[in-house]
Amino acid sequence: MSWLSDLILFTKLSVLDLLNRQKLKRIPEPDSITTDPAAVEDYNQVHNSSLVLPYALSLQILQILLKNKQNIRLLDLACGPGLFSKWMAQNLSIQSLIGMDLSNPMLDRARERFVKNESHLTSIKFIQNDVTDLSSIPSASLDLVTFMNAAHHIPNLELVKKTLSEASRVCKNDGFIFLADHTRPRTEKILKIYYHWISKKNKKLGLSAHNLDFYHSLYAGWDTQEFSLIIPAGTNHKWIEIYPLGFQYIRFIIGVPLDFGKISFADLKVEKSLDFIPVEFHPLWKLLLIQFKLGARTKSHSV
């Protein structure tokens, strides 16, 4: 029954998304830095929440992008409690890792997560720093810069664009910049349907503090047009925007080498991540993968 109810709700949201223009205005989050102990602990268990879905999809896309890369030097911006950092360390050919965040409690959780050093990593650092200021990092010194589920925490579009521009500067010309974040729903009605649907699943898993943050985040997200405005000009990378067919709840902005071809989603595997996705989210995971395998939309931006 869960599969059918999820499909019905997903279809309803897709139709509403298609029929409506952007009406919902952005409301910045009450706190741009997550330090509340309950919220930090919920984020530390993010693999048991709805956020596991964009993380799992992002990891598969990164595996496709980086399948021929070895000894990757990684910078994970707004790394939070280090869950996605850990997944990348375990599933990509990562040589060294820098995790960056403004929240010390989040960084403490990240350090705990890496307390047993990954044997193949030559260096692991977690540093407190504003992700819009990468002046301490040398140019062209990294192979991959990730910026997961945090662009909506940045107060304005110019600072998000600056972050991507700086990410391109510190990344090698043949490296990749990877941003993923949710989009702000078009209307209040769409937001409420989406929030109640997902928050019910999170609540069953005991993540009430995460639900409050999720609610504020939906209002603080950038809309589908605003995402196009964060693409920086004059960088050494080509920029690709990726979004799903139907309900546009997520956006990817990826900086790729100038000679990079097209991204193929044929290799996305529905079964691949089911072992670490909670059963409650299995129907949604399958819908998400089908949506991208059959209907992902891409838009290239000139440099």
Image (cartoon, grey):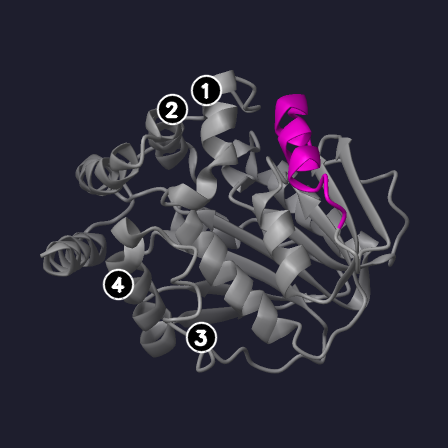
Number of the label disc, if any, that sits on residue 192: none
Q: Is residue 184 left or right of residue 133?
A: left
Mark 2 or mark 3: which comes first in sequence? Answer: 2
Amino acid under disc 2: Ala
Amino acid type of the residue tagged 4 in the rendering:
Gly
Residue type, label 1: Ala
Give neighbour class at mark 1: few <14, some 14-19, many 20+ (Cα, 10 Å).
some
Quarter-of-image position of residue 178: bottom right
CB contact under 8 Å: marks 3 and 4: no
**Residue at label 3?**
268
Give yes or no for contact between labels 1 and 2 (Cβ–Cβ under 8 Å): yes
Image vertical order of residue 137 relative to residue 56, above or below: above
Mark 3 or mark 1: whose residue is earlier in sequence: 1
Residue 160 vs 211, above or below: the answer is: below
The answer to which image quadrant residue 53 occupies is bottom left
**CA distance separating discs 2 and 3:** 31 Å
Q: Which residue is mark 2?
A: 209
